[in-house]
C-alpha cells in the first residue's frame, strides 16, 4: 500500500499582556499539545524587545520538538493590538517592550517555508468561537476577551470583519465615560479602563479595598463572592462599561449574539447578572432588546483555535486584504 503522508499541523500562537501561549492544532480544531509562559516584562531598554521575543522563541522551539514528525502547515498568530497588518509589526498596548516589533518576520525565520498569518486577539477569539465554540451557527457575532485588557472581534456574514488595518472590533477602546480614568492606550474613559482585570483592581484599591492576597482580579472576585461591597461595585461598574460597549457595537453593526471570554469572564457568576441588567437598561431600541450574551466555550484556548483556523481554514477566516 502507498505510504500515507502525516496530516499537517498548525502552529498557533497567542500573544497577550499577561501570558503568551502556543499550541499544535489539528485540522479539525483539536489541540494536540500546548504550552504557555508569563509574558516577559524586562526593564525597558535597547534589548527589551529581544528579551520578550527570546521567551516566546524558546517556548516555540519546545513545541516544535513535539510534532511527532508531522509537518507544520503554517503559523497562525493571535496578538493583542494595535498592530500593522500590512507591515507585519505589532505594538501591543500591554507589552511596552514591543513597539513596531517585526513579529511576522521573526516567526517566518523560526519556521521557514510555511505561511505566517496574523490577526488580532479579539478577531482570533471570534474566529475560534465561531468555528468550534459558543458562536457556531451564528454568522453575525461579537466576541469580547476580558482579561489584562479588553479585546474584541467581529464576525459578519460568516467572515471576520477586520477593517482596513486589521484592528476592527476594538470594543475595549470605545469611550463610554467622557470624564473617565486614563486607559493604557493613552485615552480616557475606554471600556478597558473600567472593565479589564487591572482596571477593576485599581478602582477597588482607590475605594479602600486592601487585598490579603496578591491583589489580582481573582482575589477581587473571591471577596466579591463573600459580599465585599467595594468588590461587588467593581464588577457592577465593569459590567456597565461592557454593556455600553456592546450596545454601541450592536447599534452600529446590527448584531444580537455576543460571546465573552478571557480571565475576568471566568467570574461569570459576578459579571453576567449585572451585565444583562445593564444591557436591558441601555438597549432601548427594539433591535437592541434581544442581545444574547453567553460565556465562551473554548476558554483560554479560543485565541489559539482561531489562530489555527487562519492556517487550516483560510477561507473564510483569512482577511482578504494584505
Image (cartoon, rainbow, N blue to C red):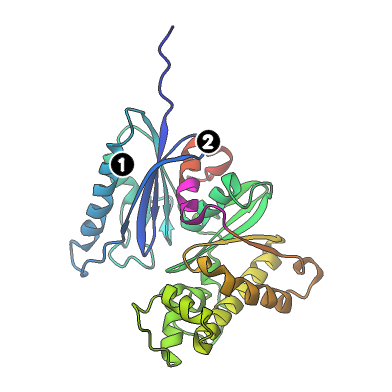
Residue 151: x and y in percent read 50, 63
Q: Residue placed at 46% from the left, 65% from the top?
A: 263
**Residue at the outermost front position:** 226
Q: Is residue 39 above or below residue 119?
A: below
Q: Residue placed at 68% from the left, 65% from the top?
A: 250
Query: Dot 1: within a 10 Å radius of its alpha carbon, few (fewer than 14), some, or many (20 or more) residues?
Result: some
Check disc 1 and report its element: helix, strand or loop: helix
Q: Is residue 178 above or below residue 117?
A: below
- Split into 4 quadrants, where in the image is the N terminus? top left
Q: Which mark is residue 63?
A: 1
Q: Is residue 301 magenta?
A: yes
**Residue at the outermost top position:** 1
Residue 281: x and y in percent read 72, 79
Numbered range of the magenta stretch:
296-306
Query: Dot 2: within a 10 Å radius of its alpha carbon, few (fewer than 14), some, or many (20 or more) residues?
Result: few
Distance between mark 2 and mark 1 Cα atoms: 19 Å
Is any atom of residue 13 visible in this view? yes
Residue 128: x and y in percent read 54, 48
* Foreground pick, 205 / 165: 205
Q: Badge 2 is on which residue?
A: 28
* Foreground pick, 62 / 188: 62
Magenta-drawn stretch, dominant element (helix, strand or loop) = helix
Earlier-in-chain disc, 2 versus 1: 2
Is any atom of residue 187 visible in this view? no
Residue 5: x and y in percent read 41, 19
Q: Is residue 43 above or below residue 68?
A: below
**Residue at the outermost right position:** 286
Amino acid at each position: 500500500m502507498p505510504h500515507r503522508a502525516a496530516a499537517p499541523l498548525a502552529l498557533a500562537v497567542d500573544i497577550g499582556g499577561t501570558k503568551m501561549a502556543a499550541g499544535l492544532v489539528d485540522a479539525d480544531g483539536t489541540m494536540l499539545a500546548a504550552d504557555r509562559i508569563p509574558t516577559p516584562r524586562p526593564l525597558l531598554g535597547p534589548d527589551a524587545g529581544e528579551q520578550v521575543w527570546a521567551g516566546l522563541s524558546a517556548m516555540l522551539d519546545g513545541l516544535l520538538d513535539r510534532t511527532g514528525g508531522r509537518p507544520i502547515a503554517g503559523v497562525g498568530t493571535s496578538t493583542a493590538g494595535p498592530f500593522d497588518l500590512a507591515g507585519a509589526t505589532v505594538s501591543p498596548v500591554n507589552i511596552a517592550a514591543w513597539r513596531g516589533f517585526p513579529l511576522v518576520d521573526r516567526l517566518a525565520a523560526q519556521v521557514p517555508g510555511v505561511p505566517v498569518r496574523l490577526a488580532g486577539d479579539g478577531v482570533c477569539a471570534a474566529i475560534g468561537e465561531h468555528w468550534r465554540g459558543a458562536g457556531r451557527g451564528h454568522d453575525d457575532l461579537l466576541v469580547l476577551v476580558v482579561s489584562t485588557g479588553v479585546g474584541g472581534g467581529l464576525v459578519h456574514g460568516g467572515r471576520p470583519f477586520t477593517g482596513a488595518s486589521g484592528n476592527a472590533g476594538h470594543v475595549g477602546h470605545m469611550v463610554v465615560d467622557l470624564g473617565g480614568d486614563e486607559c493604557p492606550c493613552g485615552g480616557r474613559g475606554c471600556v478597558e479602563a473600567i472593565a479589564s482585570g487591572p482596571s477593576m483592581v485599581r478602582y477597588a484599591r482607590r475605594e479602600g479595598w486592601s487585598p490579603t492576597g496578591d491583589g489580582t482580579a481573582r482575589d477581587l472576585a473571591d471577596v466579591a463572592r463573600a459580599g465585599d461591597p467595594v468588590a461587588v461595585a467593581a464588577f457592577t461598574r465593569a459590567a456597565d462599561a461592557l454593556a455600553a460597549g456592546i450596545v454601541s457595537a450592536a447599534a452600529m453593526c446590527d448584531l444580537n449574539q455576543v460571546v465573552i471570554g478571557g480571565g475576568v469572564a471566568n467570574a461569570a457568576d459576578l459579571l453576567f447578572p449585572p451585565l444583562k441588567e445593564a444591557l436591558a437598561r441601555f438597549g432601548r431600541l427594539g433591535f437592541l432588546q434581544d442581545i444574547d450574551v453567553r460565556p465562551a466555550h473554548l476558554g483560554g484556548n479560543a485565541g489559539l483555535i482561531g489562530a489555527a483556523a487562519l492556517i487550516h481554514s483560510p477561507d473564510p477566516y483569512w482577511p482578504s486584504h494584505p
